[in-house]
Image (tube, rainbow, N blue to C red):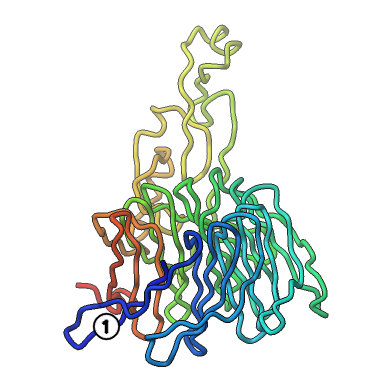
Amino acid sequence: NVMVWLKRDSGQYWPSICHTMEAAVTALYYYSEERRLFCGIDTGMISEFELSEDFNKITHKRDYAAHSGRVNAIIYNPKLDWLLSVSRDKYMQWHCCETGQRLGGYQANAWCIALEFDEESKHIFVGDYSGSIAVLRVKDDSSSLMPVTTLQGHSGSIRCLAWDPDRQLLFSGSFDRTILVWDIGGRKGTVYQLHGHGDKIRALHYVREVSKLISVADDGFIVTWKMDVDRVETKEWLESDSCQRCGVPFFWNVKQMWSDKKIGFRQHHCRKCGQAVCAKCSENTSVMPALGFEFPVRVCNDCFETITDEDRQTLATFFDTKCGISYMNYHHGKHLLATCSTDRSIKIWSIELVMKDNLS
């Protein structure tokens, strides 16, 4: 079912429309200015509807035979009148909404899960089940798609994408519980990490006017991240056969263990410098928000001494909803956040204070 809920004079929401589709609805996109609604279903079909001015009637306009599998994400661009979609059939499809014709497509190596689009540069970002993000560009004459590059950094499948058009930052959320910030505009391959969730990331939304990223996950937390601050790229983990601080061998370094007559130790890594260290040389933990670590993580003893109280100041706000969240949508004008929870409820949150940094 596709349902439209209206807020009555009593303050309660009641359904004004309940429209039954031929299969389960798996993706939605609503363009409020023209009241156009796009519904992707489990069979791969995308249906376009128009809502009446009083939101009491829904009119079917067109069907797009876009995919052969579940539609996972839809984006409609009103300026170009394009419809973009991704599916479990491993395809990203590109349609013209004026004619209904297919303009092009892209085949990935795994299920296509997430989708994002930059109108100005006409770049399309497709996140897939393998953890890769394909970057595509529409040619200047809009005749075809051209692959640009593939971004790889997640160890789990991509679940959601968000885009900052001003600084050209791409945000990706994954089942590996991390959010990666890709500096596309900088063209230097810079990637920042955000660690604040304890379970799979489900949805992301970038609020352009306040430079904040909103994320939700299966852990039930709504997190807002400050993105107008100087963040530091996370160091890559170095590999070594012995501790890079005190020199003791790790347990697989049989040669040094035999020569030093010592038992090998387990290898750890400092999250600040990336060096391979033993447990004795990394006895401390600390938060490092500038590096994206909002939870305490292991650091070596030398790096721990350099971390100041100012370095530990949080750059994110956390709110526990007490229930896993599977999806969200944000209304920019009213600062309202709608979430779909695993208890099958839709909740509407006012987060105006969070957006304005006035939380008490």
Q: Nearer the viewer, residue 291 or 48?
A: 48
Secondary structure found at label 1: strand
Q: Give the crowd class for mark 1: few <14, some 14-19, many >=20 residues within 10 Å.
A: few
Residue 15 falls in image quadrant: bottom left
| Residue that label 1 marks | 7
Quarter residue 107 falls in: bottom right
| Quarter that holds the N terminus | bottom left
* Residue 186 place in picture, x, y as percent: 66, 68
Q: Write the residue at 53% across / 44% down.
A: 156
Percent x, y of residue 214? 41, 67
- The answer to whether residue 81 is left or right of residue 284 is right
Residue 185 point in image, percent of width and height = 65, 70
Does 292 sit above or below residue 328?
Answer: above
Farthest residue in the left direction? 10
Taking the spot 33% from the left edge, 62% from the top edge, the residue there is 222
Q: Where residue 312 sits in the image (x, y, percent)?
A: 34, 56
- Amino acid carrying label 1: it is Lys
